[in-house]
Amino acid sequence: MTALTNLVAVVMGLLLTIVVGFLQPTIAVPAFGGLSLVELPTSGQLAAVLLTALLCGARVGLMTAVAYLAFGLTQFPVFHAGGGLDYVLEPGFGYLLGLMPGAWLVGRIGQQVSLRDPFSLWFVAMVGVVVVSLVGGMHLLLGAVVGHWSLSWLELTIGHWLIPLLLQAVMACPVAVVAAVLRRFLLY
């Protein structure tokens, strides 16, 4: 990709990440008499960054994550629970840091391997989810070791690590389907 193409892709990835971050993900579940929509207690930010990395590659995925992080740390409330430099002290900040290596790795794998089916793309997206979760978990652990969090380690592990990991695994499914359709359309 040329520099201009990379810049356009990063801006588009950043806009996608910001817009999706303001939307509440929902899932359709069977209910008596049809389907019911249930809101997921998560954000689509990771899904947007992973989709950008799967479609545009490691460099654009990483630059999108860096731009999103810089944008949110400069007082724009684009993160799930706000923005600004104080967000560094939030339990969820480690996941934002994890966007960078997660996006790079997903984009790198996506560039190296010709992926077209949704299951393979879901597996690659899950690699990114796991990387982001590991970085987020290390941030939680560091905060617990220095006594920064008011919650117990069990509450932190379940509420800020295990549940988000499972929810992001669900969010990786539409990422894989959309990436499969767009990669065919873009002739990958």
Image (cartoon, rainbow, N blue to C red):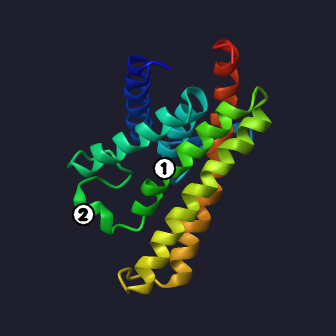
Residue 31, quarter of picture: top right
Q: Is residue 135 above or below residue 20?
A: below
Q: Nearer the viewer, residue 129 or 28?
A: 129
Residue 187 locus on image (x, y percent):
68, 13
Element type at marker 1? helix
Q: Which mark is residue 99?
A: 1
What residue is shown with label 2? Answer: 86
Q: Amino acid type of disc 2?
A: Asp
182 to 104, vertically: above or below: above
User: Residues under labels 1 and 2: Cα distance?
Assistant: 18 Å
Quadrant where the C terminus is found in the figure: top right
Which residue is at a point 51% across and 45% down the rendered structure image? 46
Q: Residues within 10 Å of mark 1 (few under 14, many from 20)?
A: many
Label 2 crowd (10 A; few <14 / some 14-19 / many >=20):
few
* Residue 64 visible in the shown view: yes
Q: In the displayed image of the protein, which residue is found farthest to the left?
A: 75
**For the point 63% across and 57% down, which residue is it?**
130
Q: Position of residue 146 (x, y in %)?
A: 38, 85
x and y, in percent, of residue 94 in the image: 44, 62
Residue 113 placement, left or right of 148: right
Can you give x and y, in whole percent of width and height, for residue 51 in the image? 57, 34
Task: Work out whether residue 120 or residue 188 is closer to the camera in this orientation and state it.
Answer: 188
* Residue 154 appears left or right of 109: left
**Sooner in the amino-acid sequence: mark 1 or mark 2:** 2
Query: Which amino acid is tagged 1?
Result: Leu
- In this rendering, is residue 5 above or below 72? above
Given residues 110 and 184, the one toward you in this image is 110
Q: How many marks?
A: 2
